[in-house]
Image (spheres, rainbow, N blue to C red):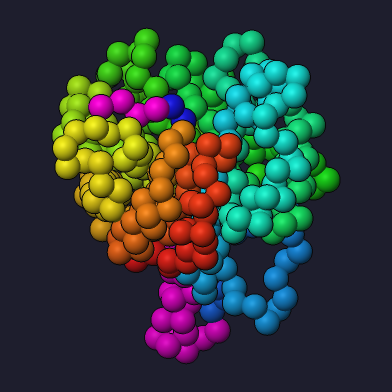
Amino acid sequence: MGRVRGAHRQRPNHRGSGLLLGLLLVVVLSVVVQEQHPAGDSARELPAARSTAAPSEPSTAEQPVARTSPYAGVGTWLSRYRITREFGGAAPAVTPEDVDAMAAAGIRTIYLQPAADDARYPGLLTTDLLGEFLVRAHAHDLQVVAWYLPRFGDIAADLRRLQAIAAFRVDGQGFDAIAVDIEFTDAVELAPRNAALVELSEQLRAALPDVELGAIVLPPVVTDVLNTAYWPEFPWRDLADLYDVWLPMAYWSNRSEEGFTDPHWYVSENVARVRRHLGDPCAAVSVIGGYDVQETAEDYAAMARAATERQAIGVSIWDWPTTPPSAWPALRGYDVAGC
């Protein structure tokens, strides 16, 4: 996820709809109807590395999104420059042992970059460390979302890497979800870039129908107001049914314009605009804040307050090494079920 310059929207058969339909059919037809899980509710291709819930626990279909989504709650971010030898050197700055401190800080989800759109590295990066991150995170009952930044020059290669991410296993453990970082604008003109983005997203959804996909997007306050030339005609509606959760990069710390530096307003406005563009007032949103700046605890508290008011299912900070310890208490325990 680069510096920003200047629930896939809940499908018609989203969580719980299969159960409700079954109950209605029981009433109308007076027959026993076996519940059928919608595509997004079946056993995911990216299983969490934990024991299954006891029979007395509510089924996935009965739980709100925030209880089941890897994008819910508090998260932190790690790029390939922090965790891989290919980009971070022989001794990467962040190691699997750091997961212990993340768990102690109240983090529920680690967003981790396991591959790069780089012809030198057609596969995953530093797979031994990726496996250690997964195992250690799952031992702490944390979720791990893999994120990937396509450059839209070779979507076949992008899809291969994304499928490799989905297939990656260590001791039977894999990533809990996959997010696509949609922000690269260099080298590819607008029309072919939009076409490539939509095509990649369609192919990814078709290839991984049961994986919870996240779309990491530019903040609409930037693209709508501050820099309308950044990515005009962004294909929101074409993507709306292809991603489950939307993650706007609401980095108020990037802004210097008067009226745009307030974290509460900036987060709130970006969430509202994402949903407006999607045409879905209850689209699942998980907000990203921070960005390599020593923001205050009060700023993060304002971020959490805005996210709560907008019923965002999650809040996260970019990135782990640059986030001051004082930030985490302001977010700890964030638990919002969404709309």
Residue 206 in sight from this viewpoint: no
Placement of 215 over or under 155, stated as above or below: below
Viewer-proximal residue among 131 and 35: 131
- In the rendered view, tell whether residue 333 sits above or below residue 21: above
Q: At x 57% / y 15%, what residue is drawn?
A: 118
Front-most of residues 27 and 250? 250
Q: Where is residue 277 in the image (x, y as percent from the top left)?
A: 23, 44
> In this image, 107 relative to 181: left or right?
right
x, y (%) of residue 197? 39, 27
Give how far across and how far down residue 135 sits, in percent: 77, 47
Question: With 257 as the anchor, is 175 left or right in this view?
Answer: right
Task: Work out whether 124 lies above or below 18.
Answer: above
Residue at horizontal 52%, vertical 65%?
A: 333
Residue 175 lies in the magenta stretch: no
Along the viewing direction, whichever of 303 and 311 lies nearer the viewer:
303
Magenta stretch: includes residue 24: yes
The answer to which quarter of the image holds residue 215 is top left
**Farthest residue, direction right:** 171
Range of residues picked out in magenta? 3-32
Residue 27 in percent (x, y) is at 42, 88
